[in-house]
Image (tube, rainbow, N blue to C red):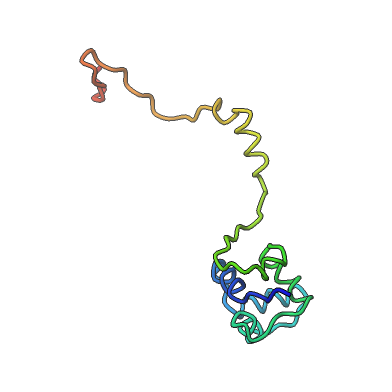
Amino acid sequence: MRKFNGNRLRAMREQRCYSLSQVARLMKLRGREVTKQAVAHWESGNNAPGAENLVALSELFDVPIDVFFAPRSNYVFVRRDYDGLTELIEKFSNHELLEVGLPGPELPEPSRKGRADISGEG
């Protein structure tokens, strides 16, 4: 049986700049009565969250539950926020972004000497 990795929980909390109290409050919003002391005990390895708290932590940090049991401590946490990503990929794949010109200043024509005349005196 794999052991709960409290360091993983701490890393995810710190990555999101959450305090222990904030994690406890966010857990309460998910229907779990959790104190900041309980979160600290989970992180230190003194205790492990129960099944319902694991589900709430998984939802809070938007990761699968097994992440909390993975042995490696250098796991990269990426929030699964796909809003607009599919549309952006489609635009790139259809080259729509390349066809849209952005307005900007007109560049001066090169002079006969090969340098641009930026004085405005033609």
- Left or right of residue 13: residue 66: right
Q: Position of residue 14 (x, y in %)?
A: 54, 71
Q: Which residue is outermost to the top?
A: 112
Rendered image quadrant of residue 40: bottom right
Q: Residue at x 65, y 67 (%)?
A: 70
Location of the N terminus by quadrant is: bottom right
User: In this picture, is 33 found above or below 57?
Assistant: below
Residue 68 or residue 28, whichever sits in front: 68
Q: Which residue is drawn at 59% across and 83% down?
A: 44
Q: Where is residue 5 in the image (x, y as percent from the top left)?
A: 63, 74
Rendered image quadrant of residue 45: bottom right
Rendered image quadrant of residue 97: top right
Residue 68 or residue 98, whichever sits in front: 68
Residue 27 or residue 67, whichever sits in front: 67
Q: Position of residue 22 (x, y in %)?
A: 62, 76
Q: Residue at x 67, y 48 (%)?
A: 83
Location of the C terminus by quadrant is: top left
Q: Which residue is outermost to the left?
A: 113
Residue 44 or residue 71, whichever sits in front: 71
Q: Which residue is outermost to the front?
A: 1
